[in-house]
Image (cartoon, helix red, strand yellow):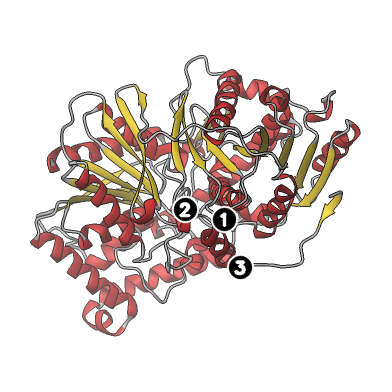
Amino acid sequence: MRGRMYLGEEKTEAKSEQIARSAWHSGEAAHPVVFGATVGLYTPPAAGSLLSDAAVLFLSPWGFEEMCTRKLWRLLAERAATLGLASLRFDYPGTGDALDLSEPADLAAWDDSIIEAARTLRRFSGARRLVLIGHGLGATFAARLAKVLGADSAVLMAPVVSGRFYLRELSAWSKMVDEGLGLRQEQRITEGTAVAGLVLPEKIAETVRGFNLERLEAQPFARALIVERPGREKDAAFAAHLAALGTTIARLDYAGYDDLVSNPTLAHQPLAVIDGVAEWLAQLAYKGANADASEPLPTAVDLAGDGFVEEPVRFGDNARLFGTLCLPAGTRRGATVLLFGTAYDRQAGWARGVTETARNLARNGVASLRFDAANVGDSPPAPAAPEQVQYSDAQLADARAAVDLLDKRGLGPVVAAGRCSGAYLAFRAAVDDRRIAAVVPVNAYTFRWDPDMSVDEALKVNPRSLDDYRQRLFDPATFRRLFAGEINLGRALSNVGLQILRRLIALSPGLFGRFTSAGRLSLAAHGDFHNLAARKVPVLLIYSEGDVGLERLKLDFGRRGLSHHGNVTVETISDADHNLSPPQAQAAYRALLLDAALKAG
């Protein structure tokens, strides 16, 4: 297959996932394996597929890009499985669910993990040939290490051709992400290389700066598929350079790239690209020779770190959910914390915050479970569940499965905790499941979701409180951004109008509470809090100072708030955004969560 690939059939995301699910173990999660300082997910060939003597090693991008492409990796692994190809995806040390990097942190640690991942994949699959699929920096690593890994083929998606250009682009990307989150200048990480709260170690950044794939002097692999971003001349130039070195090149337009990497919450999977990669893999999957003998997968795996021991687990019906039990290395105390994820962030959380929270709890004697709900990150969709799972009651089944696992392991009582949509799910789970002993919602936007409201549209709005809008009104930077066209004035005015309307509703709750949708939902939320009070379930509501959720709380529950419920406490964290990005905000949250877990135990 030469030249650029074009695909005629388009599929909806739901249909594409349905195809993969029907052929791949009916939605079973991948098998966790531990090697070196990291954890990987091994996907064997699908039952009934024609086995190949090749296997696929996924090499991830870094930072915000990795968060956005996590689900893409799962979908590609499932498609590869239907072709008889085993695969392995994993985290580099210091990222995701891996152990932290040792100091001084340099790229050698990531290179070592890639080499060990290739050995692990060959050991469990028996594969004689290795195919690399890399995205962003992962594509660059594939080109650098192909000979060392013994790989003869590669899929290079949005490769980082010039490290120097990549770091400049990353700096601009970081600023856009922070502005989208509403971070003030003093709350941003401005030193070194950082994006979305993740910091690229200095020595690794220095090495990356020197990357230039157009200087490769020898053919890295015999065959390659280059997935080129629209308008990126360097992607095309790199494909031409590889061809000049003797590599057989196929090229595929990266349709949907911008929609994929702009925001993990709103990311749309590039279905045509997934089909194109699968089509290319199908042409090299079989060589006629069977794979060598493979090792059986381990039944239990642990990752031991400083003060904690983690066990990656599969649980729920048909082992459909993937999560991580984080246990103290010493004596356990208090209740176990069930950490719900936010939106479509993988279980490690925004800026790896959930992983770090879990390990902080363990160092203080408290166990936890973090996991991907169905159709989030590494957990496949649940049968018959809606495509949009956020703010859906379908996720309550996942919550019950998580509590079932903790019950089975003797790790009760349970404290449910989460931020934003994870806070909503934690609260709904506590109302739904009497086994949950306490709940800690953080920056909850609402406690009852309006079923007539589009989740997708609501997520695009990114509302702020009236106090926040008032502060920004007098900030000169706001006017500079407005004149530069960087602010959606119509959307901002709509947000302000909606909040003013809610304040008007709050003035006449008796009237509006019965005859408006918002009022009826508010009354239902009152009933939920009465339910938890009757069961004497402690509720610790944590808000960033000025968060829009705190304003909604005041509107829904009036001036008295929830003070008449002796089980409810409200805490605010100053100088924090909705994501609790500043380190001091994270520290304050973790201290409050630890205290709640110890009291509930």
**Is residue 564 shown to the viewer in this render?**
no
Foreground pick, 339 / 141: 141
Q: In the structure shown, which secondary structural element does the residue marked by tag 1 occupy?
A: loop
Q: Residue at x 28, y 48 (%)?
A: 417
Foreground pick, 323 / 429: 323
Q: Mark number for residue 267?
A: 1
**The C terminus appears in which quarter of the rendering?**
top left
Coordinates of residue 478 in the picture (x, y in percent): 56, 51
- Give the foreground label among 3 and 2: 3
Coordinates of residue 314 in the picture (x, y in percent): 37, 45
Cβ atoms under marks 2 and 1 closer than 8 Å = yes
Q: In this picture, is 135 found above or below 551?
A: above
Residue 315 left/right relative to 254:
left
Q: How many angstroms separate mark 3 from mark 2 (CA)?
A: 18 Å
Q: Residue at x 91, y 33 (%)?
A: 244
Foreground pick, 456 / 87: 87
**Is residue 91 shown to the viewer in this render?**
yes
Judging by the rendered image, the residue that carries numbered circle 3 is 12
Judging by the rendered image, the residue that carries numbered circle 2 is 344
Coordinates of residue 316 in the picture (x, y in percent): 33, 53
Q: Amino acid at mark 3?
A: Thr
Q: Amino acid at mark 2?
A: Tyr
Residue 259 falls in which quadrant of the image? bottom right
Label 3, residues with CA under 10 Å away: few <14, some 14-19, many ≥20: few
Cβ atoms under marks 1 and 3 closer than 8 Å = no
Residue 260 left/right relative to 413:
right
Q: In the structure shown, which secondary structural element does the residue marked by tag 3 occupy?
A: loop
Coordinates of residue 119 in the picture (x, y in percent): 57, 26
Cβ atoms under marks 3 and 2 closer than 8 Å = no
Q: Amino acid at mark 1?
A: Ala
